[in-house]
Amino acid sequence: MAPTERRGHFAFAGADGACYAARMAPLSDNLKGSILMMSAMAGFTLNDTAMKSVTETLPLYEAIFLRGLLTVVALWLIGMAQGGLRLRFSRADTKILGWRTVGEIAATVFFLTALQHMPIADLSAIMQSLPLAVTLAAALWFGERIGWRRMVAIVTGFLGVMLIIRPGGESFGIWSVLGVGSVLSVVLRDMATRRFSREVSSVAVSFYAGVAMLIVGAAMIPFDGWQTPTPAHLGGVALAALALIAGYLAVIMAMRVGEVAVVAPFRYTSLLWAVAMGFLVFGDLPDSWTLAGAGLVIGSGVYAFYRERALARRAV
């Protein structure tokens, strides 16, 4: 039988000339959210790699400003191509946007400052605690129920973070603390994102995030310095901006489409990207303690994920 495709159907012409049509099963919201989250992690890791490379020779806030400028222009063009960028929010959504912007600024500044001084895989290992932190925050803010088993998994995961940063050890410093601060800031950002009404577009939210970082970069340039960027700097910043836009849009849609407990664990794919990028671009590999801590965090998160799925199946 020869298949033909039409509007989500596959039609097959049988030997007798009759047509038999089968509708393709639509993707579930959780599957869509999971794919979007994995795509977001790839985009964010590429952005991190480009920014770490650029800021080795270019002032940090100049790089943030240039990336913000390119990001805002690109998002504006995307919005116009979609029929217009609706930037006026309701009073409730404006308040949520304010909290999300605070989280966005803090997360970006903490993360990029730490990234200048830490291997990308080490910082990514700390960020692997995000799904557990988001799950805990969802329980505290949205009243989502978590049993004692998932709570034990969350505590175990945070112990894994302690193993990664090793307070009191030689590798511990202010940069590790900033990495943890970035985790907490992203939790604030993601929780705020889930509170937006359906009328708020992902492009508009991303646009405001880009504007916020553009303003922060411009405000800090007098204190951080400015130097004329080379073509290599501009190319790296452009790559970072494109990857960041992809990550912005994908993570916002992921957090709004799927359930937090299902979608959030797919952030773990960022560690795979970070290890690969760190080795290929910078020649860095995480040490055994970092890998052990990351394994503990990821193992706890995976257990929490499957526990959530088991409870969901029982409830059906």
Image (tube, rainbow, N blue to C red):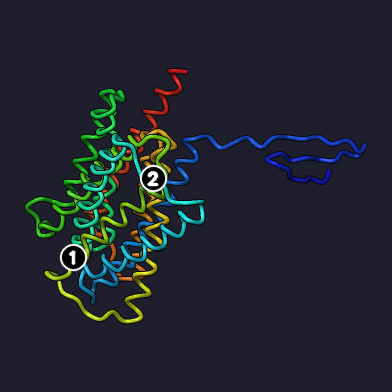
- What residue type is disc 1 on? His
Q: Nearer the viewer, residue 305 or 285?
A: 305
Quarter of the view holding residue 155: top left
Quarter of the view holding residue 27: top right
Observer-side mark, 1 or 2, equals 2
Marking on residue 42: none
Label 2: how many Cα within 10 Å (few below 14, some 14–19, many 20+)? many
| Residue at the limit of the structure toward the top, as seen here | 315
Q: Please determine whether, in this image, residue 281 is positioned above or below residue 273.
A: below
Q: Where does the image place residue 70, in percent across and percent down from the top left?
A: 36, 66
- Residue underneath mark 1: 117
Q: Where does the image place residue 222, in percent across and percent down from the top left?
A: 14, 71
Q: Please determine whether, in this image, residue 106 is positioned above or below residue 152.
A: below
Marking on residue 252: 2
- What residue type is disc 2 on? Ile
Residue at the location (19% across, 76% down)?
Answer: 226
Residue at the location (11% across, 56% down)?
Answer: 172
1 or 2: tag closer to the N-terminus: 1
Q: Where does the image place residue 219, in percent across and percent down from the top left?
A: 17, 64
93 horizontally vs 32: left or right: left
Label 1: how many Cα within 10 Å (few below 14, some 14–19, many 20+)? some
Residue at the location (32% across, 65% down)?
Answer: 69
Q: How many circles with numbers are drawn on the protein?
A: 2
